[in-house]
Amino acid sequence: MKQRNHRTPGRARRLLAGLAALPALVALASPAFAAGPPTAEVNTTDLAVTDDTVKVGILHSITGTMAISEIGSVQAEKLAIKQINESGGVLGRQIEFVQEDGASDWPTFAEKTRKLLRQDKVAAIFGCWTSASRKAVLPVMEQFNGMLYYPTFYEGLEQSPNVIYTGQEATQQILAGIDWAVKEKGAKTFYLLGSDYIWPRTSNKIARKHIEKKGLKVVGEEYYPLGHTQFNSVINKIKLRKPDVIFASVVGGSNVAFYKQMKAAGVDFTDESPLLLTISVTEDEIRGIGGENVNGIYASMKYFQSLDNANNKEFVAAFKDAYGDDMVIGDVTQAAYLGPWLWKMAVEKAGSFDIDKIREASPGIEFKKAPEGYVRIHENHHLWSKTRIGRAQSNGQYEVVYETKELMEPDPFPEGYQ
Amino acid sequence: MFADYSSTELLSIFAMQGFAGLSLFSVFVLMAMGLAIIFGQMGVINMAHGEFMILGAYTTYLTSQFFQTYMPGFFAGYFFVAMVLAFLISGALGAFVEWAMVRHLYRRPLDTLLATWGLSLIMQQAYRSIFGAREVGVNLPDWMMGAFQVTDLVELPVNGLFVMIIALSIALAVYLLMFRSGWGRKVRAVVQNRPMAEAVGINTAGVDRATFALGCGIAGVAGSAFTMIGSTGPSSGQAYIVDTFLVVVFGGAQSLIGTIVSAFSISQAQSTMEFFLSGSMAKVLTLLTVVIILMLRPEGLMALKIRR
């Protein structure tokens, strides 16, 4: 009895001592658990950052006409976020994403951006695909000071402090492509063909200028309304003018019609007379067109699924593991994958989630694990990247036949286009 | 523009260009025939026409997959099976839609516009959920690819010829059905005077359902044929709907002959202008001409002269 009485206070004392030590223990354990600096330090602008999570937004069309193109980007962004989380997150915080549907409607994109920035207070948005959606989102991004990672190759003529452009701007794609066709294939005459909206028109303007500067000739330039499905007349015209190169920037459903009708009209692209060089057909599009219809065309882009390097093999394997073996990865999908990684590096370089600090930290950031090989962010918020020429095969993949030696400098405002 | 070419070259280009115009004509006829029946004969504006076409295209896609997996030996002929299936499936869905929705709206023609537009959205999203948002690639048997070498310079695309034959056969079949069969006589009677037709014992509800189903079934066949020349995706049908209405309205809504005449004039105008001007300009000029002619002749090219 006595002994028991004696013991009980002893136990209580030990318990009390233990309780007293607890805060110290928690204090010791929590940095090891979250491994990040305190929230007050890394988030001075009231973003959705807690001690162990940070919220970002994904904004693409998952319904409507653009869903065809944008779903690959959503998949790539989610994959990157998952991988970043598995490797410890950003400044010790796990990334949570809020996904919104732009529904292929540009005002909806703007409205959802407002929601993501004002209500969800996301630290970054990965999203948009068409230039039209980006232009709609831009004023909102600038008004509420958000940061958008935009994946698509596009026409340039833009540089916002609130956007990082992870795809190529027009000159990177076009100049390298035309130089290659002239040097390797001896091309002298070009026929420019595109869908009728800003991207093909600006691209062809850049192409024409570059071609004429070399003293070569553009023998035709032509645009068809989006969704146009009858190309027989233009195919006859091309046969009449006999260009060395057809430079094509046809998009969407028109693509399918164009290549099927070229093939049906007896044009065999593997003959390379004329040679077809496109800047708009990625592996994604070939799925709809059918590999046998594009066999032998060339594409000028920064990424092909078949790129032979260790980063890319790992990326392709992870992508197929996550979404199924029959997935194909096009240029834009890869560029979308870069977004979350570039953001993570900018945050860690800045030591803060604040948008202004990320903006300052971004130029000069190098991503050596990029599937396309290596990229670096330029002062103008675009990426230094190599341009490759791929030759389409009937299995729907491109075989890389050429790659620029140096990284191409992004030049969103080429002389004479403002 | 033509100075550098020999006369044989020019001749062959013009021959191929003529063919291009004719194949555009057959595409228009195929697109418009189903709609002309529904719009012209029933006064129902079917905004989901494009989606019925794509239903036919997806049927073709599934049939091609099936043949490739289970009967590769018969792959060369699968397209004919696919077209029949496309007709039956689109037609059956058409009959169902008429029963469930359209028949309640006959007295409110503008409401059918909204209802069928809603239907088109539902169908698009259904395709997206079932087949995925990406376009699917429909494999064609080898004999349907490539071109028919007529002379050294003149090459005619096989699939163009094929579309042309389908369009002509369907036009002929519709003609026989509408103007040379008892059923067609009933349809025309209902169009001209519904109460009187009912009074002489014609089952107008049955005629309506069959007409709607026939229009949708033809749309399905058209969609099936278009897998050869266009894309197959959830929203591909949207690419056709404007041209389709243009052809039907321009031809005079109640005249099937008018539809054919209008398809011919629009396609020839467009393909000729596409050759001499640029693509977008050709479209602008075609539409302008149509607008002006419709201002002068609001009832379209061929108006049915009947007492109302």
Image: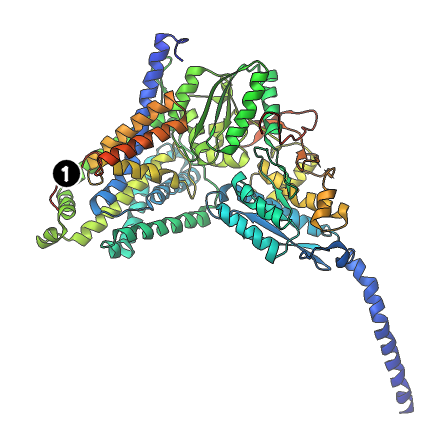
User: Label 1 crowding class (10 Å Cα cut-off): few <14, some 14-19, many 20+?
Assistant: some
At 66% from the left and 29% from the top, the residue drawn is A386
Q: Residue B283 in the image: x percent, y percent?
A: 36, 30
Report whether A14 appears left or right of A109.
right
- Identify the image quadrant of residue A31: bottom right
Q: Amino acid at mark 1?
A: Phe
At 33% from the left and 32% from the top, the residue drawn is B287
Chain ID for label 1? B
- Screen quadrant of the N terminus of chain B: top left
Report whether A244 appears left or right of B78.
right
Q: Nearer the viewer, residue A347 or B179?
A: A347
Q: Residue furthest left?
A: B200
Q: Secondary structure at mark 1?
A: helix
At 14% from the left and 38% from the top, the residue drawn is B179
Q: Residue A121 in the image: x percent, y percent?
A: 63, 56
Q: Nearer the viewer, residue A11 or A330?
A: A330
| Residue A300 against residue A211 in the figure, above or below | below
- Identify the image quadrant of residue B20: top left
Q: Residue A292 in the image: x percent, y percent?
A: 47, 29
The residue that label 1 is drawn on is B179
At 32% from the left and 25% from the top, the residue drawn is B21
Report whether B277 appears left or right of A243.
left
